[in-house]
Amino acid sequence: MVISKEDKPDIESAMIVEKGNKATLYGLGSMSDKKRWRVYEISLNDRVVKNKTFFEKDAVFPGIEEVNIEGSTTIENTVVLCNRANEKTRRNHLLFWNWKDNIDVKEITLPKTKGTAGMSGLYYVKEKDLLLFTASEEATDNAVSDGEIGDSFLGWISNFSTKTAQAEFTPDGFLKLSAFDKAFEQQKIESVCMEKEENTSLLLHLVADNDDGRSKIFKVRLTL
């Protein structure tokens, strides 16, 4: 069943938080509309599900013109979120939150692409101190409407924990996926996670959501 745009919580990202012997999965709404501020908190120990929010619906994120949270991950005790650009609000941002105080918002400038590449997913590889992210082009001028799909990208920031105090970010790597395999053409890649580290490479999973009610998962190997 496809949930209507007016009713869906728009869960765009997920992250696992480990505290002691307890692991909790969080599914975050995009916060792009009044019904999309929902957060599902799922205890992986006892499978208890709670419905909550992280921020008030009138929360202010300095420097962000239109809220559209599409990626989430954690580094130590800090939550890192990404806010997606579109063809009107062309800036991508990383948001840093320590679970209780104000959010620290910083711009991340992606390499120039044919269309506007909006960040769509995050994953932090602790073993490599590497922030992975996905981005995709979509011909829309707002955070809610769908549009024609363009290219998708996989990027990363190396030594990320040493750079979190920077005022802004640029990627250390940024790959157009269709340049490596035509299977990625017209695929809106929405996020990334790592299955395992293999010697000098990472085995990753990429997921595509093409706004037609179906999803695709790609398994790729990234050698840095």
Image (spheres, grey):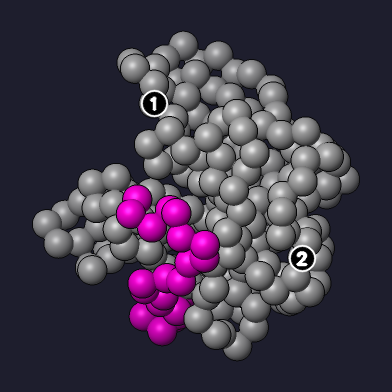
Q: Residue at x 64, y 83 (%)?
A: 115
In the rendered view, would you say 25 is above or below 92? above
Task: Give the percent coordinates (x, y) of residue 144.
Answer: 80, 58
**Which residue range is magenta in the image?**
161-188
- Residue 82 placed where, x, y %? 58, 54
Q: Is residue 166 magenta?
A: yes
Q: Quadrant of the C terminus?
A: bottom left
Q: Amino acid at mark 1?
A: Glu
Give the residue pinned by disc 1. 18
Is there a contact, CB below 8 Å, between mark 1 and mark 2? no
Q: Is residue 114 magenta?
A: no
Check the image and name the residue furthest to the left. 199
Q: In percent of the image, x 44 and y 20: which residue is there?
A: 44
Looking at the image, which residue is at 54% across and 23% down?
Answer: 42
Q: Position of residue 193 (x, y in %)?
A: 40, 50
Mark earlier in primary sequence (1, 2): 1
Pick whichever, 18 or 191, lies toward us: 18
In the picture of the structure, the residue carrying the numbered disc 2 is 146
- Which mark is in front, 1 or 2? 1
Q: Residues within 10 Å of mark 2 (few under 14, many from 20)?
A: few
Q: State which quadrant residue 192 falls in.
A: bottom left
- Relative to residue 3, is residue 127 drawn left or right? left
* Image quadrant in which the N terminus is located: top right
Q: Whole-Å distance between the Cαs marked 1 and 2? A: 34 Å
Q: 197 above or below 158?
A: above
**For numbered disc 1, what is the local secondary structure?**
strand
Closer to the camera, 124 or 147?
A: 124
The crowd level at tag 1 (other Cα within 10 Å; few <14, some 14-19, many 20+) is some
Q: Secondary structure at mark 2?
A: loop
